Image (cartoon, coloured by chain):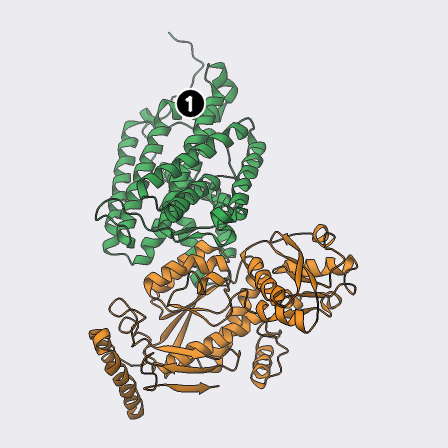
């Protein structure tokens, strides 16, 4: 578990990221609009999955309630836009603030637990939000959901009504969010989180405030999940309790695991895979759930590190790293 | 061929005369559309997996039965039915609608089962000007406060059967005091609301209302709350809840003491398949259709459906069968020119323009009698009557 910090690798991953971005930016020129829809959905879910990876892969906290912040931001943006006709930027800000506040409150309750207990507490907290969305009918529309959220007007003449402008906007937001999260994982804060994941007691012994680090990671992850949710609400034009349900949270976790936890970009790959598989296979056969399940089982059996993890392992086998770049092997030899 | 040409010319001339100014080039363009054998594509958003899979399957079966009976052809054009599974999730329904409209370029869309799914696709289809058949999805607002010209509801709205039922219960059954118990979401409120409105207008009184969450695993706490001094219990638990509710109703000894009445989906055929006959016996419910309907058309449909699928048709199947009939009637009326949407109901000519084509049908399922008119103002022009 060495952080990929060698200079050539970072340069390479940056080139790869730039190439992917360029490809995605050029896509609307050739791809049918339906694929842009699926990609935009991927971006929304991808931001949520990446933020969840901050918790699962980097901090070692598996949350089963991550859709709560996604939904809180989505509902906040929706309520502000439909009931109070508030413009895009202030509504987005308030939506993110709502997600942060909820994450900050829930974090106080959840962070004290670890492992399966953390899983159960986050699940329960997520169900609270689901219950609110479902039963607070006067505010959320209940089971019918909240519909009629207008596409954002970014500024004069910048109305994202059509799918192509919205796709570009979502792409930019996603790239910025992914970049920010990527920087976070490489920062001293991110490295500390990895330390917490490996051994809490050792980090505590080294003088780190483990609780605070975990708490901040939880809140930051909630904020990014909220960003995905707000984007999603503006894209789809509606939010419903299904978007904050346990299934939605489990899907996010699935995206992280499928893509490869602790790889950040892998979560985006996992989100893309899940969105595309679900929508493409279900067009071919009614047994799509069975096929999806089989793929998940196979990937867990044969690629337990996720798709990105498996790809990295394959690449490493194909081209072994030069001797000098290998992680130093600790030796018992006495120093001269 | 010559006959088709004359008929088309007649129809379009009427439209041209009535609305040349409003329609402009749009109608002219429709004249030169190639009328070959290109298939009519119908997008079917089905819920064949997930929580409502049983009823969703019935919907698809009903629609496909009609197409099979007509050899999958309408107005001389073959019909391609593109089925997409939304699994009862609103966001999926929207994604599937986008796929069907933008990828498959369907000419007509059919809406999925749940109200939440209907609301999810509502803005999209309105914005895309995509005629969509709502055969089951019954949320009141879709044709009331949130109505749109492209929403064609041939099924029902939730409170609709409850309205005459409330009056009938008060006047014919002569019940005075009724308790209600229903699923705690919009559909339940609308069904109970319709009943309460006409029941109380006719002199009755709803003395107690109980709401149980959707998917209540055990109905005993709710059944035991029911007041024993009422004349009847009006209930509308949805889906598998209905089976659990009726079981609890009998187990707690209310059956036989207080008559059970309710909304139609309480005793829908799709549920009767899994219900204990002793639980169901003697319950009176109101819906626009039942497999027991004695009209020859309904019985012919029931026989055909049983022969093909080895089960009794539920109303989900019937509304989709008759929904397909409606689509057929509309397609025949515009002589198969399903591409002609822009010209007469689009940005260049809003749907309120005099050239808007209207199809008005009588409310008797499986015996659709439709009056179609090319123009609201000059209805005499191309008005005709179809009875199947």
Q: Residue at x 21, y 46 (%)?
A: A156
Q: Residue at x 31, y 89 (%)?
A: B7
Depicted A56 relative to depicted A274: above or below: above
Q: Secondary structure at mark 1?
A: helix
Q: Could one spot residue A252 in this view of the protein?
A: yes
Say which quadrant the N terminus of chain A sits in.
top left
Depicted B294 relative to depicted A194: above or below: below
**Relative to B224, is A236 on the left or the right?**
left
Image position, residue B338 (x, y; %): 33, 75
Closest to the observer, A257 or B254: B254
Q: Could one spot residue A308 in this view of the protein?
A: no
Image position, residue A125 (x, y; %): 54, 37
Image position, residue A260 (x, y; %): 43, 39
Chain B takes which shade in the image? Answer: orange
Image position, residue B290 (x, y; %): 61, 75
Residue farthest toward the top in the current orientation of the protein: A336
Image mark 1: chain:
A
Q: Which chain is green?
A: A
Say which quadrant the C terminus of chain A sits in.
top left
Q: Residues within 10 Å of mark 1 (few under 14, many from 20)?
A: many
Which residue matches tag 1? A192
**Relative to B135, is A124 on the left or the right?**
right
Closest to the observer, A281 or B245: B245
Quadrant position of residue B292: bottom right
């Amino acid at each position: 578990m060495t952080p990929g910090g060698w200079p050539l690798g970072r340069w390479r991953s940056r080139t790869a990221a730039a190439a992917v971005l360029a490809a995605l930016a050029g896509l609307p020129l050739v791809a049918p609009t339906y694929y842009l829809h699926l990609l935009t959905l991927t971006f929304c879910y991808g931001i949520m999955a990446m933020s969840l990876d901050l918790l699962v892969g980097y901090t070692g906290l598996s949350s089963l309630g991550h859709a709560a912040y996604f939904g809180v931001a989505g509902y906040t943006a929706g309520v502000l836009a439909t009931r109070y006709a508030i413009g895009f930027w202030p509504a987005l800000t308030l939506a993110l603030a709502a997600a942060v506040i909820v994450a900050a409150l829930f974090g106080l309750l959840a962070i004290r637990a670890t492992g399966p207990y953390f899983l159960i507490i986050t699940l329960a907290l997520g169900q609270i939000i689901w219950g609110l969305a479902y039963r607070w009918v006067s505010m959320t529309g209940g089971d019918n959901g909240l519909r009629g959220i207008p596409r954002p007007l970014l500024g004069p003449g910048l109305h994202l009504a059509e799918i192509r402008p919205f796709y570009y906007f979502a792409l930019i937001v996603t790239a910025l969010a992914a970049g920010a999260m990527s920087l976070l994982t490489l920062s001293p804060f991110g490295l500390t989180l990895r330390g917490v994941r490996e051994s809490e007691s050792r980090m505590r012994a080294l003088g780190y405030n483990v609780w605070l680090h975990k708490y901040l990671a939880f809140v930051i992850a909630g904020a990014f999940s909220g960003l995905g949710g707000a984007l999603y609400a503006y894209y789809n034009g509606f939010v419903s309790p299904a978007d904050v349900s346990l299934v939605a949270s489990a899907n996010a976790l699935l995206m992280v695991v499928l893509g490869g936890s602790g790889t950040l970009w892998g979560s985006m790959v996992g989100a893309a895979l899940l969105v595309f598989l679900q929508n493409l296979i279900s067009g071919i056969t009614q047994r799509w759930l069975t096929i999806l399940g089989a793929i998940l089982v196979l990937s867990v059996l044969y690629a337990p590190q996720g798709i990105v993890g498996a790809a990295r392992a394959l690449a490493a086998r194909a081209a072994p790293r030069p001797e000098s770049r290998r992680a130093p092997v600790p030796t018992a030899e006495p120093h001269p | 061929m010559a006959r088709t040409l004359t008929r088309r010319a007649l129809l379009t001339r009427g439209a041209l005369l009535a609305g040349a100014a409003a329609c402009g080039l749009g109608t002219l363009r429709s004249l030169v559309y190639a009328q070959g054998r290109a298939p009519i594509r119908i997008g079917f958003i089905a819920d064949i997996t997930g929580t409502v899979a049983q009823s969703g399957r019935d919907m698809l079966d009903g629609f496909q039965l009609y197409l099979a009976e007509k050899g999958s052809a309408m107005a001389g054009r073959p019909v391609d039915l593109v089925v997409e599974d939304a699994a009862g999730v609103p966001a999926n329904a929207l994604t599937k609608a986008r796929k069907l409209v933008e990828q498959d370029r369907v000419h007509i869309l059919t809406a999925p089962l749940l109200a939440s799914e209907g609301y999810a696709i509502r803005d999209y289809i309105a914005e895309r000007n995509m005629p969509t058949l709502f055969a089951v999805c019954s949320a009141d607002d879709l044709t009331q406060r949130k109505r749109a010209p492209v929403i064609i509801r041939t099924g029902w709205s939730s409170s609709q059967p409850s309205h005459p039922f409330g009056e009938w219960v008060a006047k014919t059954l002569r019940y005075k005091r009724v308790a209600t118990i229903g699923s705690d979401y919009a559909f339940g409120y609308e069904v109970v609301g319709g009943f309460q409105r006409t029941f109380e207008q006719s002199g009755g009184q709803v003395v107690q209302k109980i709401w149980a969450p959707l998917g209540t695993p055990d109905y005993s706490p709710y059944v035991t709350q029911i007041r024993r001094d009422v004349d009847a219990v009006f209930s509308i638990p949805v889906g598998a809840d209905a089976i659990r509710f009726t079981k609890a109703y009998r187990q707690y000894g209310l059956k036989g003491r207080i008559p059970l009445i309710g909304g139609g989906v309480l005793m829908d055929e799709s549920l009767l398949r899994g219900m204990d006959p002793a639980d169901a016996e003697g319950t009176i419910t109101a819906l626009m259709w039942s497999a027991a309907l004695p009209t020859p058309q309904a019985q012919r449909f029931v026989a055909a459906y049983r022969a093909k699928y080895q089960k009794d048709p539920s109303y989900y199947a019937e509304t989709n069968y008759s929904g397909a009939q409606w689509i057929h009637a509309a397609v025949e009326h515009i002589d198969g020119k399903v591409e002609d949407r822009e010209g007469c109901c689009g940005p260049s000519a809003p749907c309120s323009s005099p050239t808007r084509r209207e199809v008005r049908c009588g409310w008797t399922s499986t015996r659709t009698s439709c009056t179609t008119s090319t123009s609201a103002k000059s209805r005499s022009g191309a008005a005709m009557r179809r009875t199947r």
